[in-house]
Image: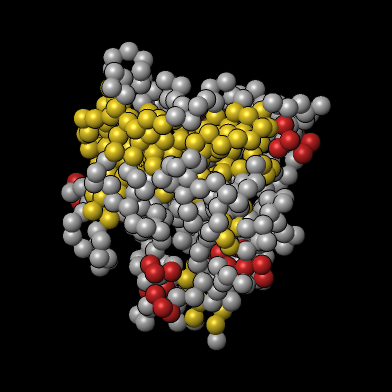
Amino acid sequence: MKRIRAAALGAAIIPLALGLPSAAAQDRDQEHPEDLAQEQPATDADFTRSVLATGLSDPFEITFGPDGMIWTTERTAGRVTRVNPETGEKKTALTIPDVLTTPGEQDGLLGMALHPDLLDGNRNQYVYLSYTYDGGGQGPEGEQIDRRQRIVRYTYDADTETLGEPKVLIENLIASDDHNSGRLIFRPDGTLHYTIGDRGNLQDLNACKVNQAQRLPTQNEIENKDWTAYQGKTLRLNPDGSIPRDNPKLKGVRSHIFTYGHRNAQGLVVGPKDRIYSSEQGPKSDDELNLLRAGGNYGWPNVAGYKDDSAYVFGNWAAWPECTPEKYNAFEIPDAVPQMAEHEFNDPAFVPPLRTFYTVPPDYNFRGAACAPSGFFFICYPTVAPASLDFYSDDAIPGWENSFLMPTLKNGTLYRLPLLDGNGTRVNGALPLFTSVNRYRDTAVSPDGSTIYVATDSGGLARGTNGDATSELQNPGAILTFRYDGSTD
């Protein structure tokens, strides 16, 4: 006998024209339309769309620098590029020769954070980067490639417009071909935050590998710089890579770990009251928007989204002696595989998400009919695959003030998530914008707040106009421009 409520992958059966879930797929956020501002928010019709730049190699991070340029990391080229936001002209600031990138996988040059003092005086002319490299041995669970991640500080030379003088802050972080996450930001308190995924363990070709998202490090491991337990975590580091003294103690050990129990948090942003938020890709349901609290446990892999037993059961494939990747099934968990319902997970440190995208009933059919021709059913799962997270605090675009902006991979849509309170603890709705057949990877907002820039992947699968998977992307490896020029009257 097999159970038909399986724990596995992540990704939506969301009608392309609307970008909204089907009637069977509803998020669990309480809607409060009466709390929304009365000003009519700008919609698609109020923006002019154009293509700023093409020919980029999987732009992962885009952010405005103090020089007015869009700073970009190109994941598969190992390159940092500065793009003129008016002309699209590109200038290479750095190419890192030892970046490891594997075709079709999720390694490479990932997150970037600009020091707040960059180009403001003579101190702290720094740019921080995270990238995958080859550790030179065998991987931690027998992988042929020993993928590792490091965070490196580079010094910017304004005269030559190049980055140099690399200083490694932390390395030997265990990386993977899947779920590396890799977002890096500065917080106003001067610390760096960084997301590390769970390496895709317990699914697909990594199905039989132990998921470490719940494991916490020992004091001995920290003293020996053994970062094995950092998988599935959010880190908080001093700018020199050391452990902040006010980081939380977890089971009596202070480490770089700020939060744990994460699957694949690809979004990270500072919001109201300097609080930090993440967007996280779920398995077959329950992508998440999270408010990160020091020492918080976000539940994965025991919980996806809320502890509600809705269409998710934790299947610990790695604990099944007969497990092989070929025996893994995204839709059915054999009885021999140890399982746990969400309500069975009890930890006082558990923090539920602010909302999910999308929670579905236990009997939901994940084999979406639209994806039957291709067989890529993950495209029809009721998730949107959040790729990053930004916060819009300006008033240049009517009705957008105090909203999260969340680009998504599967259905090429930017979602606007309005906040309902000044504390940043309630959100209302998931309003779809700028939908196209692309994989939206990251966003940047112009300094005057009037223009939204969106970076797209160079390849991969997205939802086509027929609802099925397609690899024919409209704007691969590009930065798209959406300029507000309309009236909401």
Out of 322 and 17, give the one closest to the viewer: 17
- How many discs mark residues in the rendered view? 0
The structure residue drawn at horizontal position 79% and vertical position 36%, both measured from the top left corner, is: 34
The structure residue drawn at horizontal position 39% and vertical position 64%, both measured from the top left corner, is: 201
Report x, y in % for residue 224: 18, 49
Left or right of residue 16, residue 223 in this image: left
Out of 160 and 120, give the one closest to the viewer: 160
Kindly tell me whether residue 228 is visible in this rendering: no
Left or right of residue 101, residue 266 in this image: right
Kindly tell me whether residue 476 is visible in this rendering: yes
Which colour style is shown?
A: secondary structure
Q: Quadrant of residue 338?
A: bottom left
Can you say which quadrant of the picture contains the C terminus?
A: top right
Report x, y in % for residue 422: 62, 29
Report x, y in % for residue 333: 51, 77
Left or right of residue 119, residue 473 in this image: right
The structure residue drawn at horizontal position 53% and vertical position 22%, both measured from the top left corner, is: 447
Can you say which quadrant of the picture contains the N terminus?
A: bottom right
Out of 16 and 137, give the one closest to the viewer: 16
Report x, y in % for residue 316: 43, 70
Kindly give the residue lying farthest to the top in the view shown. 121
Out of 405 and 460, give the one closest to the viewer: 460
The structure residue drawn at horizontal position 45% and vertical position 55%, both measured from the top left corner, is: 263
